Amino acid sequence: MIIHVLQHSALNTLGTVEEYARTRGNPLESTRFYKTKNPPALDTFDLLIIMGGPMGIYDYDENPWLRDEKAFIKQAIEAEKPVLGICLGAQLLADVLGARVYENGNREMGWFLLKAVRTEENKPEFLKGLPEEITVFHWHSRTFDLPEGAVHLFRSEGCKNQGFIYKGRVVALQFHPEMNEERVESMIRRFGEEIVNGPFIQRKEEMLGQETYLAETKKFMFAVLDKFEKIAGKGKLE
C-alpha cells in the first residue's frame, strides 16, 4: 500500500504514521501545498492521509494554497480513493463534503477520554476491533458538523463530533492518533503559550511522559491503518 501524506507545516511530523509505514514496508510520500502547486497523480498512491496544522481551513488570505489542497482532496474522494484526515485534515474533509466547520465550545489540549459511538442504530463496521474507550491526545479549538451521509464514529466530553466515516472509505478523526512523545514535545514547544486554564486543557507536565497512553494510541493508529491496508485493493471500508 503506497501512502501519500499532505503536510501543512514543517513542525507537524508524521509520528506513528511514519513508524507504521516503515514497520509494514509501505512506501510513504508527501506533498506540501504551501510549497508546491503540483499534486501527485491519483494513480500513484493507495491511501491519502491529510495531517494536522496550525492554520484554520478558511484562512485563505494567509494560506491561499488551501483552495488548491481542497480541490485535490475533492478529486481524491470523487476518484474513490481511501482517505484519512487527522485534526485539521478532518476539518478539511468535513468542509469538502459540505459540512460546517466552526469554533468548538471547548478547547481540548492534552490527553482525554475518547468514546466510540456504537448503538443499536449506529453500528459502523469500521469500529470492529477498536476499543470502546481510549485516552488519546487532543489539540484543537474547532469542530465540525457531520457531512450528509456520514456515520458518526467517536465523541469526547469536550467535543461531540470527534470522527466520522463517509461512503465506507473516507475517515475523519479530530483527535491525534499519530502522536508519539516527540510530537507531544514539538506541540508544546511551538504552541505552549496556548496552554491556559480550561476544563479540557492540561498542564504541560500532564501531557509529557504518558507511556501507557502513547502505547495505546500507537496500537489504535496501527489498527486504523491496517483497516485501510485491507481495503486498499477493494475500495471500501464499512
Image (cartoon, rainbow, N blue to C red):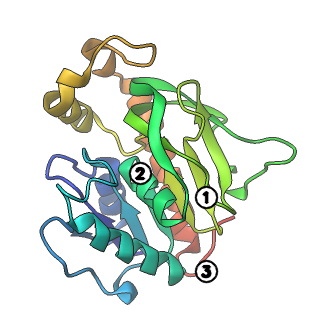
- Identify residue for label 2: 86
Q: Position of residue 110 (x, y in %)?
A: 37, 24
- Identify residue for label 1: 147
> CA–CA distance between discs 3 and 1?
23 Å
> CA–CA distance between discs 3 and 2?
23 Å
Classify mark 3: residues with Cα within 10 Å, few (<14), some (14-19) or many (20+): few
Q: Is residue 35 above or below residue 129?
A: below
Q: What quarter of the picture does the C terminus occupy?
A: bottom right
Question: Element at badge 3?
Answer: loop
**In the displayed structure image, the side of residue 17 where residue 75 appears, left or right:** right
Q: Position of residue 190 (x, y in %)?
A: 15, 33
Q: Is residue 7 above or below residue 145?
A: below
- Identify residue for label 3: 234
Question: Element at badge 2?
Answer: strand
Q: Position of residue 77 (x, y in %)?
A: 50, 75
**Mark 3 / mark 2, whichever is N-terminal:** 2
Residue at (63%, 73%) from the top-left corner? 236
Q: Position of residue 175 (x, y in %)?
A: 45, 40
Q: Amino acid at mark 2?
A: Ile
Question: Element at badge 1?
Answer: loop
Residue at (87%, 44%) from the top-left corner? 120
**Of the two numbered discs 1 and 2 in the rendering, the one whose residue sits closer to the viewer:** 1
Q: Amino acid at mark 1?
A: Pro
Residue at (64%, 47%) from the top-left corner? 153
Q: What quarter of the picture does the N terminus occupy?
A: bottom left
Examine the rendering and report whether any part of residue 129 can be seen. no
> CA–CA distance between discs 1 and 2?
16 Å
**In the displayed structure image, the side of residue 62 where residue 124 appears, left or right:** right
In this orientation, which residue lies closer to the viewer: 30 or 22?
Answer: 30
**Mark 1 / mark 2, whichever is N-terminal:** 2
In this orientation, which residue lies closer to the viewer: 216 or 35?
Answer: 35
